[in-house]
Image: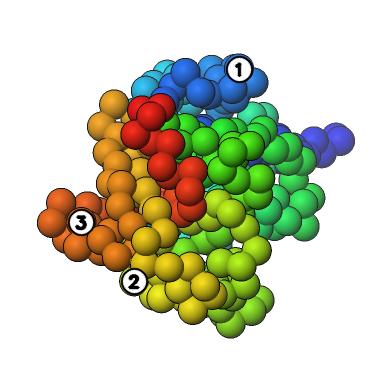
Amino acid sequence: MTEITTQPCLGKVYLVGAGPGDPGLMTLKGKTLLEHADVVVYDALVSLPILDMISDRALKIDAGKRRGRHSKLQDETTQILIEKARQYPVVVRLKGGDPFVFGRGGEEMQDLVNAGIPVEVVPGITAGIAAPAYAGIPVTHRGYSSSVTFVTGHEATGKYRPNINWQAIAQGSETIVIYMGVHNLANIISGLQQGGLTAETPIALVRWGTRPEQQQLIGTFATILAQIEQNNFEAPAIAVIGNVVNLHSILY
């Protein structure tokens, strides 16, 4: 009698960017994958209207991370993706914004490729562009800024270099967009001022960008820290620095 062995299913993982929150900014390809996924592993910053796009039959796994509150470690999340891809045909890793813009998508894709799991990235609209836009702040403008730098304000421990050269960034870009920088903003401002930016440099903080609950603070390096305290303004927020911030009063 011939012995029959069952080979494990080898599905595919899709790293899908959910965008910054407004469900209208979700890509058609991403929405279609959510409607057909067998498993969706999602992050904390994915908005509820986008989670509602997920098929009722799909297994939903919360892998959200917030500052100081990680529901799952990164290695655990990757292991879940590998295990589920060996059990189900279509696995979606749903990430806020764009997977490859401060979303750890590159790390997860590397691990999946090394494990022999087919993987595809589906880009999303990043908050660093969309949140300022919804606050009436274009990150580039021919009359104000012809360059923009996107940088994280929250550096990982054990990273490839010891720290961000804020002085060089201050001297090299007319618009600076900072992700995850609210908790470290005092140090960031100090570094940028050491690079030549003045106390009157315009800065905007946009919290929950593109969502109905969006909030923004508009100020300068000299005022913004006091404004944060007075308004109990908390993360998650995008910081925009440069003269383009002055367009908020015109365009918002």
Query: To which residue does mark 1 refer?
Result: 28
> Which of pointers 1 and 3 lies earlier in the amino acid sequence?
1
Q: Amino acid at mark 1?
A: Leu
Q: Residues within 10 Å of mark 1 (few under 14, many from 20)?
A: few
Amino acid type at mark 3: Gln
- Packing grade of label 3 (10 A; few <14, some 14-19, many >=20) is some
Q: Name the image quarter holding residue 122.
A: top right
Vertically, is 1 above or below 77? above
Q: CA distance from mark 2 to mark 1?
A: 40 Å
At a point 68% along the width and 53% down the height, the residue shown is 106
Label 1: element kind: helix
Q: Name the residue located 49 percent from the left edge and 43 percent from the top edge.
A: 244
Residue 145 in sight here:
yes
Task: Identify whether 45 is placed above or below 75.
Answer: above
Q: Which mark is residue 19?
A: none
Mark whose residue sits in front, 1 or 3: 3
Give percent across and percent down for residue 60: 43, 34
Q: Position of residue 24 (x, y in %)?
A: 47, 18
Q: Which numbered tag is attached to residue 227?
A: 3
Name the residue at 61% across, 50% down.
148
Q: Earlier in the sequence, mark 2 or mark 1?
A: 1
Q: Residue furthest front?
A: 143
Q: In screen coordinates, is 194 left or right of 9?
A: left
Name the residue at the bottom extreme: 162
Three-letter residue code for mark 2: Ala
Q: Give the residue at the far right of this rendering.
A: 2
